[in-house]
Image (cartoon, grey):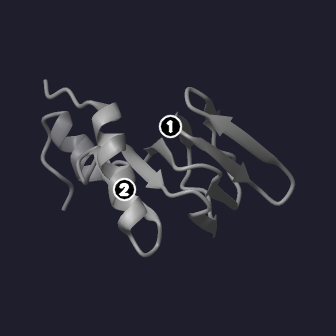
Amino acid sequence: MQPISLDALASEQLTAARSSTNGRSARTVHGGHRHSLRQTLLALAAGQGLDEHESPGEATLLVLRGRVRLATALDSWEGAAGDYVVIPAERHSLTAIDDSAVLLTVAVRSRPETLNEAAGQAPPR
């Protein structure tokens, strides 16, 4: 077991975001090629964000610090530290109202060979 302090990581990433030319910084907390879940801590300086983009699939957002606005063509949501939202399955943007840190959780598809290996079977050829 390898615990991680999200509070310490948020501080680190906010410092990096404030000095970055694009006003953001991110670190994968969990996930990768062999996982079906990816969690990323994303830090955004006030006024910065992610332009409109496609939904990554099933995903949630937990605000760790600051305030953010998640917007689609027809709706918007404003969240503060401690707030949680399921990201809509449509194009959306994310903007930091204040310096902010969020935990983005995305369910990603597992590779078939990974599922077979987990079951103790040889990967398909």
**In which quadrant will I find the C terminus?**
bottom left
Asked which secondary structure carries label 2, the reply is: strand
Image location (x, y in percent) of residue 9: 29, 41
88 horizontally vs 110: left or right: right
Image location (x, y in percent) of residue 111: 31, 53
Q: Is residue 36 visible?
A: no
Badge 1 crowding class, 10 Å Cα cut-off, few under 14, some 14 to 19, many 20 or more, is many
- In the rendered image, the vertical position of residue 59 relative to residue 49, given as above or below: above
Residue placed at 46% from the left, 73% from the top?
22
Image location (x, y in percent) of residue 24: 44, 62
Residue 26 is tagged as 2
- In the rendered image, the vertical position of residue 64 relative to residue 107, given as above or below: above
Image location (x, y in percent) of residue 54: 62, 64
12 horizontally vs 101: left or right: left
Cα separation, mark 2 vs mark 1, equals 14 Å
Asked which secondary structure carries label 1, the reply is: strand
Residue projecting furthest to the right:
74
- In the rendered image, the vertical position of residue 23 relative to residue 26, given as above or below: below
Displayed quadrant of residue 51 = bottom right
**In which quadrant will I find the N terminus?**
top left
Q: Nearer the viewer, residue 71 or 124?
A: 71
Q: Earlier in the sequence, mark 2 or mark 1?
A: 2
Residue placed at 57% from the left, 64% from the top?
48
Badge 2 crowding class, 10 Å Cα cut-off, few under 14, some 14 to 19, many 20 or more, is many
Residue placed at 56% from the left, 44% from the top?
58
Q: Amino acid at mark 2?
A: Ala
Residue linked to disc 1: 65
